[in-house]
Image (spheres, grey):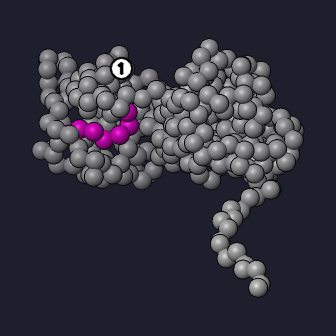
Amino acid sequence: MAARRDTAKVNVSGYDFRHPARVNKDQLRTLENLHDHFARLLSSTLSGAMRKIVDVDTAFVDQTTYREYIMSLSNPACSYQFQMDPMQGAIIMDFAMPVVFGLVDRIHGGRGFSKGVEHRQMTQLEMGVLARAVKRAVADLECTWEPILPGNQIHSIELETNPKFMQITAAPEIVILLAFEVNAPGLTGLISLCYPYFTLQSTLPRLGMQTAPRHPGISAQRAREQNRLRLGGMSLPAVAEIGRTTLSASTASTLAAGDVIRLDAHVDDPAPIFVGAQPKFLGFPCVTEPDSTAVKIAGRIPPQFSAHYGTVDTPARPEHRVLKSSDLA
């Protein structure tokens, strides 16, 4: 009698030997949740440096080889390699060149636009300006890792403009890549973090046991009160726009005191009030004292209509009144 064949199906899972998964999904998810906090801190840092709203969101978290990561960087680049105690090994933080030039342009009084900027090597002056922003970004990363690595410290920060000269690990070694998308008016780009596997190796067991601190039981009202207290000492530039118009250069050159310029707004129309360069309120000009003018807030601008009003540039040293966050409650 012939032996019966075993017809039971065997489940076979594929394994990529070129890109082996050295970090499991739970640990990757914990890393992503941890660096979501870093994205929020970085958004605040860049918004303060550029004096306008900058959104930073986690784009993706991936495992790849160090060779592929280096090949994905531009040349020239703006990459900082550093070490974080108690981790063993180096880490790379790369700023895409559009982000670099937009940040430098805004700090020097420009509009912070990066479109159409020539891809070139940074000057010594630009490196010095960027170093101050990177110092604050590194402090944000230290704060991000504080729940996992209490008392961590970043040191030995070095700038490298040629990715081929960064040899923090072997080319085929697996690295954990986190990319953050930066978005602001006229500015888009990526900021990436590269952790070699052996740098995270001693920390991975902790990632499986704890995550960044959260407050799942907090109510919406309590969260609103905490945010109001946290922002209580923050000041924002406020600009009330009476109207806009467009003049040719020849017409503008002939203007003199006493000339009348026709604006696009009616005398009874409310003036949009820009807070931090973004349209937030509608109000009416008024006089509070014989020699003092102000704007009386009439209501909020619905978010779906904010694009109609555009944005304004707020000067580094505004001459107008500064509107505090307590006034916006």
The local secondary structure at tag 1 comes to helix
Residue 21 visible? The answer is: yes
Write the start and end of the magenta stretch as one range: 276-282
Q: Taking 254 as reference, is 141 above or below it? A: above
Residue ID at (30%, 28%) = 218
Q: Residues within 10 Å of mark 1 (few under 14, many from 20)?
A: few
**Residue 107 seen:** no
Horizontal and vertical percent for residue 153?
A: 67, 17
Q: Is residue 243 left or right of residue 113?
A: left
Above or below, comparing residue 29 to residue 304 in the picture: above
Q: Is residue 318 magenta?
A: no
Which residue is pictured at 17% across the width and 49% down the height? 266
Type of amino acid under label 1: Arg
* Residue sitting farthest toward the top: 151
Q: Does the magenta portion include 277?
A: yes
Spot occupied by residue 96 in the image (x, y as percentages of width and height): 66, 44
Looking at the picture, how far across and down is residue 137, in whole percent? 60, 27
Q: Picture quarter containing residue 102?
A: top right
From the viewer's perspective, is 325 left or right of 43? Answer: left
Q: Is residue 163 left or right of residue 286?
A: right
Q: Going by the picture, which residue comes out furthest to the bottom?
A: 1
The chief SS type of the magenta part is strand
> Relative to 92, is 189 above or below?
below
Please report the residue visible at 78 percent of the width from the left and 34 percent of the height from the top.
198
Q: How many marks?
A: 1
267 or 279, nearer to the observer: 279
Residue 253 position in % (x across, y down) = 43, 44
Q: Residue at x 31, y 29 (%)?
A: 217
Q: Which residue is mark 1?
A: 230
**Foreground residue among 21 and 171:** 21
